[in-house]
Image (spheres, rainbow, N blue to C red):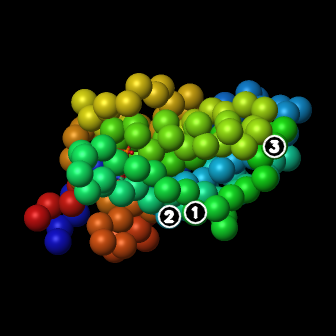
Amino acid sequence: MAVEILIAESAIRDRVVELGRRIESDYAGKPLTIVAVLTGSLIVLADLVRRIGIPHRIALLQASSYRGATTTSTMLVVNESFAPDVSGRDVLLLDDILDTGQTLAALVQHVADRGARSVRTAVLLRKIGRQTTPIEPDYCGFTIPDAFVVGYGLDYNDDYRHLPYVGILKD
Ligand code: XMP
């Protein structure tokens, strides 16, 4: 399938530098743990943490959502074998994309329930007009139109994650 470039590699690099600077000044002197949501945020995680020049920890969370058999609501299941110890930590949850907002809202609650001192959120991308769950990310890379995007960690059937840019998948 063809991929049309939406956000070029250089634009992502510049924005990640900006976000890193902001996070660095906001969390100076605090026990920061960046908790990245697998698998889509791995690439932005690797680039972002190298732009944050203060001591911090990195952790991973794996979550899967399932559509209920009898309802339209989805249920989020967190894989506890990856669960980081966040008690007393200032957690910054990092996800690749904010779509409906369900995943991030549920994970904020999950991390708060495990004793984090504070929980904020960062997303590389935020889709316009898709949000159903009210959550305002504290750090956002880019706002994008409502299209299916791949690259820079985002996948279609686990392909395309390696692309150095974010692109729209054309069928
Ligand atoms: P919600 O709706 O909970 O979903 O905000 C966030 C998760 O949905 C996936 N997602 C996408 N993945 N291209 C992708 O590769 C997309 O355009 C897209 N939109 C949503 C993604 O896993 C994200 O964490």
Mark 2 Cα-neighbour bin, 10 Å: few <14, some 14–19, many ≥20: some
Numbered circle sitting on residue 39: 2
Numbered circle sitting on residue 109: none
Task: Estimate the x, y position of residue 27 in percent, counting from the top left.
Answer: 77, 32
**CB atoms of marks 1 and 3 within 8 Å:** no
- As helix, strand or loop, the secondary structure at mark 1 comes to strand
Nearer-N-terminus badge (3/2): 2
Out of 82 and 66, give the one closest to the viewer: 66
- As helix, strand or loop, the secondary structure at mark 3 comes to loop
Asked if residue 20 shows in the view, the reply is no
Residue topped by disc 1: 79
Measured in 3D between alpha carbons, the distance from the residue under mark 1 to the one under mark 2, in whole angstroms, is 13 Å
Out of 166 and 138, give the one closest to the viewer: 138
Task: Estimate the x, y position of residue 133 in percent, counting from the top left.
Answer: 38, 30
Residue type at numbered disc 1: Asn
Residue topped by disc 3: 87
Asked if residue 102 shows in the view, the reply is yes
Identified at 27% across, 35% down, the residue is: 130
Q: Given this view, does label 3 or label 2 mark the residue nearer the observer?
A: 3
- Quarter occupied by the C terminus: bottom left
